[in-house]
Amino acid sequence: MNVSSIYKTLATVSIYHNYFLDNGETSFASMNTDEQAEQLKYFDFRSFLKITPTQETLKVMSGQKIIFKLYPNSILLAIKVGATDESIPFIPLEDSLKLNFNLYIVDSYFENYTALELDTSKLMFFSNESPIFPDPASFESIPRFNQNKLIDGDYLYEGKNKDFLLANFADNPLLLSGILSIQIKSSNTADSLINNDGSLKNTPPHFKIQFDNQKTIWKYIHRKDEFEVETKQAMPLTKYGYIKLENPTDFKSSPPSPDKYQFPNPSANSVKLISNQLYSEIFI
């Protein structure tokens, strides 16, 4: 009797953040394949986001022979397949089966460098299938990998809809920032994990959660020489790369003797909200 120990990919979810992947003013999206690969060498989403299966999902994965693996820029779901046909799950999957994961923000500066109005009243929800919300709400499906879609307010829920999601898709609401829910069969065929006959897809679905980096007005403060200057426009916050400010036209008003001073890029911990505008304060 043949005993299968072969696992095949069921789905992949890539997790990106432009704060870590952009290089100064050069966006990750504008880079070629080699340049993107170089940026990804230094990236690990686990520095800002923790993902754990719910207790119910752990039981489901154990029973269905599904494994969950974390990588620096993605998570992988793989399933045990039959010994004679590797396109057929070892244990058949029900169409309505959901795999739910708790999302926790673990970096206290996440809101500073992320272009997302996330606070404790709101919950991120990413899924390939729309739930039936108690209150009217629009639903945006989790983006596929080849879509140039950034995470925005369309993926945030509050009030009764947040309570509904916590009650039905999560098991530990304490400090929870979001939920990832992957349903085996989606009403959108492209987002389904299996074919109509229950077999695995030749090309498993690949989803993507990509956060955008925050943009702020950079305010430079020189206490000794008693002046303040700020950039004309909001500038992107990035962990890597450098945005050089050397032209007086970069600022709303020209700094005194601009050749005398250096204007370093700000860190993520210096963001302040002043009159509905985000500022990064840099003391020089």
Image (spheres, helix red, strand yellow):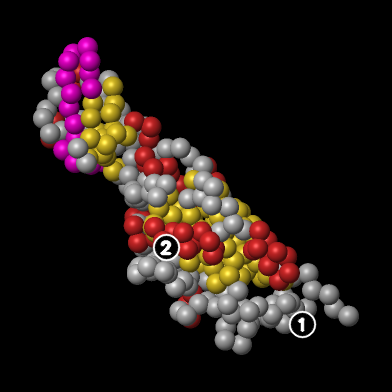
Q: Give the labeled residue for mark 1.
A: 84
Q: Is residue 229 magenta?
A: yes
The stretch drawn in magenta includes residue 143 = no
Please, what is the three-letter code of the amino acid marked with disc 1? Thr
Number of the label disc, if any, that sits on residue 154: none
Q: Which quadrant: the C terminus?
A: top left
- Residue 123 seen in render: yes
Point out residue 218 in the picture as x, y percentages from the top left corner.
Answer: 24, 33
Q: Secondary structure at mark 2?
A: helix
Name the residue rendered at 54%, 52% in the picture: 173
| Residue at the spot 48% in from the left edge and 50% down from the top edge | 177
Q: Which residues are magenta?
A: 221-235
- Relative to residue 198, is residue 128 drawn left or right? left
Q: Give the residue drawn at x 16%, y 19%.
A: 227
Residue 134 occupies quadrant: bottom left
- The residue nearer to you, when weighing 162 against 72, is 162
| CB under 8 Å between discs 1 and 2 | no
Tell me if mark 1 has few (under 14), some (14-19) or many (20+) residues whose alpha carbon lies within 10 angstroms of its own.
Answer: few
In the image, taking residue 202 as reference, residue 225 lies left or right, namely: left
Residue 161 is labelled as 2
